[in-house]
Amino acid sequence: MRAARFSLGMAMLLLGAAAVAAPITTKEGVLPPGTELGDGVGAQPTELFATELAGGKRSDQQILGDMLFASPAIFGGVARQAGISCNTCHPQGAGNAALYVPGLSSRHGTFDTTGALFNSKADNHVFDPVTVPSLRGAKVLAPYGHDGRFASLRDFVRKVVVNEFAGPEPSDEVLDALVAYVQDIAFLPNPKLENGRLTGAASTAAHRGERIFHRPFPHDAAMSCASCHQPSSAFVDHQVHDVGTGGFFKTKTLIDADFNAPYFHDGRFDSYGQVVGYFDTHFDLGLSASERADLVAYLEAVGDAAQPTTPDSVESELAEIAAFVGVLDTAIREHNAAIVAITVDTVGDEWRELGERIPEAKDTSVPGGLRERIKARAAVREAVLALRRIDMAASRGDFDAATAAYADYRAQVAPAAVAMAAAEPWSLFNTPIRRAHVAALARLTALAK
Amino acid sequence: MQSFSQFTRGALIATFAALTLGAAAAEPLKDGAANYKPFAVEQIGIALAGAKELQAATKAGDAKAAQAAWIKSRNGWEAAEPITGEFFSKLDEAIDAWPDAKQGYHAIEAALFSGKLAEIAASTDRLVADLTEFDKELKAPGFTFTPQGLINGATKLAYEVGENKSKGGESPYAGTSILDMQQNVEGIEAVYKLVFEEPLKGTDAKLADAIDDKIEDVEGLVKVGDLKKVDQAALKRNGEELAVMLQNAALKLKLKKPAVGE
C-alpha cells in the first residue's frame, strides 16, 4: 500500500486503537480527491489458507499468486499508476468496507467495476456500483461475479485484471498462480458453527433463529431461507435469484458475513436487521419482532469468527515480505526474468511501505527513537536497493550475478529485521506515536482548508 | 532562474580546464567537490531570494506574488537537496519539516495556497532567518563539501525520487510536486557531472556513461506537465537503478558505499 513521504493518502484518522486512511485531499494524484482506500495501520483482516489449516505448506504457485495479488504491475492505466493491486480492494483476501472512490462508489465498500476511471474501454455509462466481496472460501462459492455470469474463477480473475483495471493480458503462469492463491483463502474458524449447524457456543436466540431459518415460508412451503442459503453447502446454492433488487444476483455465503457489510449486491443494507426486514416484507414472511431478532442473532452467529483481524506489526509485515521474496528462489533458478522483475517491484513496494511507517527524522511530531528510526529507515532502503540489484542482474540475463545479489539481500534482511524491531516503539504501529503523527497531519490539513 | 545546464557551461569549463592542466589531478574528487560549491551557493541563493520575496509579498498582502515567490524559493531548495540533509541536517529539519504545521516550507504552503496569507508572516520570517543562516554557513570559506557526503546525498535523492507520489507529492497544496522532482533530478545531475563523472571515466568509463544515460532517463520521466503523467513504476525502477549505480561508482572511486539512510 504504497506511500510517498508526503502522501496525504497516508494520513490516518484514529478510530479507537485502530486507524484508517483519511481521504486523498490533493488534486495532484491520479485518484480523485476524496478517495479512501482503507489502507490504514492498526489491524489487518485475518487471512488463513486451506492448505495450512490442513497441515500442509503453501505451494510455490500459491505464494506467487499471493505476491501477484499484491502487485499493481498486473494492472494497467490509473490502477497501476496509483499503486492499486487486488489486495487494495481485497486486503488479505477479505472485503474492504472502507473503500470509497468518488464517482465510482455509491457508498463505502462499493465500487463501479464498469466505470471510466480505471478502464475507459469498459465504461458502460451506467452508475452501477457493487460491493467489494470477501474472497474467503471462494473455491466453493461459484459462480463468480455478483450476477454469477462466470462459472470459472479463472475467467473471472482475467476479467478483473483486463476489463476492470486495464491490465495487459495475463500469462497462463500469472493467471494460474492468482487462481491458486484465491482458491486457498479459507473461511475463518467459527466455534459457533460446525458443518452448517450451530454449536452450543451460539446463543439461545441464535438457536431459535436457526429454526426460523429452516422453517418453510408461509406462502411457499417449498422455500425457506435455507433453501437458497444451504447450510451444508457453505450457505449457497450456486444459483442466481431475483429477490426484487433489480435483477438476478447470486446467493451470498453467510459464513464470515459479519465482516462483509454492506449487504446485497449493491451494498444497500448496513445491517442484518435491515436484510431480515427486507426479506420479511419481500416474501411476506409475517415475522414478529422477536423472530426477526432471533434470525439476526442466527446470522450473527453463523457469520462470526474467532479472530477476524490480526494486529499489524513489524513482525507480520516482515513475514509477508519473507513469503513474497521466496518467489525468487524459483524464479532465479528458472531464469525467469519477468517474475524476478515483478517480485522485486512488489517486494520493494512492501519494504517502502514498511519504511513509511517509521517516521522520518524530519517528522518532529514524533518524540524520541531518532537513532532507531534512522537506522531502520536506512535498513529498509538498503533492502530495496539490494532487491533492485537482483533485478538489474536478471534483466541483463546474468543469473549468476542475480543469485549472488539474492544472497546479499538475504544477508541484509536479518539485521534489517532487528533494526525494524528496535524502531517499532517509535513507529506508526504504536498507537500513541500514530496519534501524534496523525494529529500533526490533521493540523497541516486543517491549515490548508 | 539558471538551470543546471546553463550553470554547467561555466562551471564545467573551469573544472575541465583544471583537470586538463593537471593542477588538481591528484585529488580530482576534492576539486570536483569544490567546483560543486558554486552550484549549491546559487541554488540556496535562489531559495533565500524567493523567501525574501515571499516575506515582502506577505507584508504587502499580495497573495499571487507570495505564491510565486514560494515556488521560486522551493525550486532552489529542491535543486540543493542532495546536500541539505547530508550537510545541514538541523537546518534541513527546520526548513523542510513535515508534517509539523508550525514552521518551514510545508506549513507556509498549506496556509499560503489556501488563501491564508495573514497566517504565514511568522513562519516566513523564520524561513528567511533559517535560509540566511544556511546561506552564511554554506558560503563560509572554511566550509567544504566532502565527496563522500555528496555521493551519499545524490544516492539518497535518487532513491527518494522513486518514491510513489501517485497520491500526492511533496508539495500537494501548491500543486508543484512535479517541479520539486525536476529540481531534485537537476540537483543529482549537478553533483554527478561536477564531481564524479570525469574521475569515474578514468576508472570505469562504461559505468560513467551508464550513469549519464540513467540520469537522462530519470530526467525524461519527470519532464512532464504534472504529477499525474509520471510513470510511477518506471520512475521508481530507474531511480533505484540510478541509486545502485551511484553506489557502484562510489566503490570504483575508492569511496565508501553510500549510505542511503537519512
Image (cartoon, coloured by chain):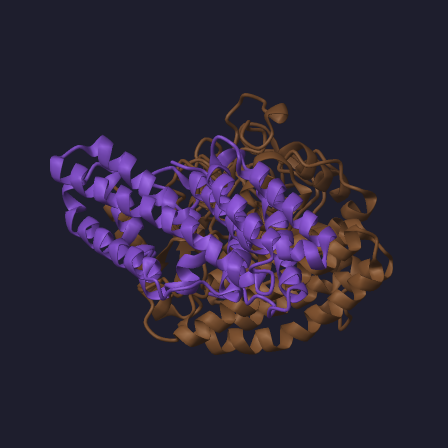
Chain colours: A brown, B purple
User: Residue at horizontal 38%, vertical 37%?
Assistant: B175
Residue B118, quarter of the rendered image: top left
Foreground: B67 or A136?
B67
B46 left or right of A254 in image: left
All told, the count of numbered labels is: 0
Foreground: A108 or B73?
B73
Kindly tell me whether residue B184 is visible in this rendering: yes
Foreground: A153 or A346?
A346
Q: Is residue B90 above or below residue B242?
A: below
x then y, percent, for residue A431: 38, 69
User: Residue at horizontal 74%, vertical 51%?
Assistant: B206
x then y, percent, for residue B172: 38, 42
Q: Is residue A100 above or below residue A193?
A: above
User: Residue at horizontal 54%, vertical 21%?
Assistant: A125
**The residue positioned farthest toward the top in the image shown:** A125
Please identify the quadrant where the C terminus of chain A is shown. top left
x then y, percent, for residue A369: 39, 75
Residue A404, quarter of the rendered image: bottom right
Foreground: A123 or B178?
B178
User: Residue at horizontal 60%, vertical 70%?
Assistant: B256
